[in-house]
């Protein structure tokens, strides 16, 4: 059983609000990732981190920001939510290396009204 | 660039039917290959993986063989069950350097009793 947790599971929030999606893992993995999943199911990498104080933007441009102050914690923040941010957000972690799989959290479904 | 291409869904089958979901990839070097499954409202779970050419990954009756000559990693199951209804993602990652995971667009499977 993978130990990676996302909170909240569901969030409905008004336009213009600041939100933080939490992601924590207890496996000591260096690599962590945020994916945005659109209604058509496709996964888009929006942020990743290879370790503490290391963050990079992913393949899909996103207005969100991330931080990695502790190995186990990789929160995602939206300073001013908009309806276009409505989506499912999935956090993942991995220890990296050949053939190593990523472990996923259960996701946060965000709705901005 | 590197990519994963999956057959479009949805795929609808009767219980006990044979399943094939096609997956091909484009990559430089020798990636590791994965199949993940996503049940409604959940994150992704690793189903199986293969790390080198001719490797066969298997789990819960599902199988996939890493075919370097055809750059393919097709998912198969001999007899599907209603409980197999989910979205299936093919993915690749690299054995060194960048540790990103590249996912296909997902294939929705619906199994009818």
Image (cartoon, rainbow, N blue to C red):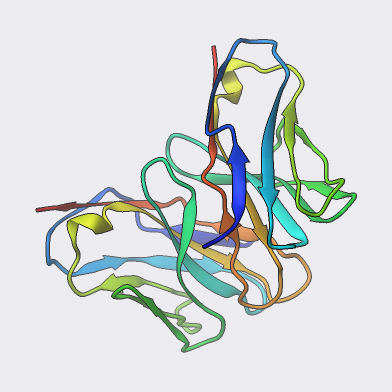
Tell me if A54 is positioned left or right of B51 in this view.
Answer: right
Q: Residue at x 62, y 73 (%)?
A: A100
Q: Residue at x 32, y 51 (%)?
A: B86
Q: How far across and how far down the image is residue B7, in percent? A: 35, 57
Q: Is residue A60 visible?
A: no
Tell me if A51 is positioned left or right of A84 in this view.
Answer: right
Q: How far across and how far down the image is residue B40, in percent? A: 36, 43
Instruction: Name the outermost residue toward the right.
Output: A53
Instruction: Name the outermost residue toward the bottom.
Output: B54
Is B12 rendered above or below residue B28? above
Q: How far across and how far down the image is residue B32, in percent? A: 58, 75
Q: Residue at x 52, y 87 (%)?
A: B53
Is B41 rendered above or below residue B24? above
Q: Is residue B67 visible?
A: yes
Image quarter hosting the C terminus of chain A: top right
Q: Residue at x 83, y 46 (%)?
A: A68
Residue nearest the observer in this picture, A70 or A96? A70
């Amino acid at each position: 059983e993978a130990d990676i947790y996302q909170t909240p599971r569901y969030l409905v929030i008004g336009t213009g609000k600041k939100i933080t999606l939490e992601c924590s893992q207890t496996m000591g993995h260096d690599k962590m990732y945020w994916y945005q999943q659109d209604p058509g199911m496709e996964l888009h990498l929006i942020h990743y981190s290879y370790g503490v104080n290391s963050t990079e933007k992913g393949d899909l441009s996103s207005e969100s920001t991330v931080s990695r102050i502790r190995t186990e914690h990789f929160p995602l923040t939206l300073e001013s939510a908009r309806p276009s941010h409505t989506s499912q957000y999935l956090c993942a972690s991995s220890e990296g290396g050949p053939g190593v799989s990523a472990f996923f959290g259960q996701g946060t479904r965000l709705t901005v009204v | 660039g590197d990519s994963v291409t999956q057959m479009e869904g949805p795929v609808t089958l009767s219980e006990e039917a044979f399943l094939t979901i096609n997956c091909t990839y484009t990559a430089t070097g020798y990636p590791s290959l994965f199949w993940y499954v996503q049940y409604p409202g959940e994150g992704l779970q690793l189903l199986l993986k293969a790390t080198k050419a001719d490797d066969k990954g298997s789990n819960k009756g599902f199988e996939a063989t890493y075919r370097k000559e055809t750059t393919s990693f097709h998912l198969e199951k001999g007899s599907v069950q209603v409980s197999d209804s989910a979205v299936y993602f093919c993915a690749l990652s690299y054995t060194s350097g960048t540790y990103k995971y590249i996912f296909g667009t997902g294939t929705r499977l619906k199994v009818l009793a």
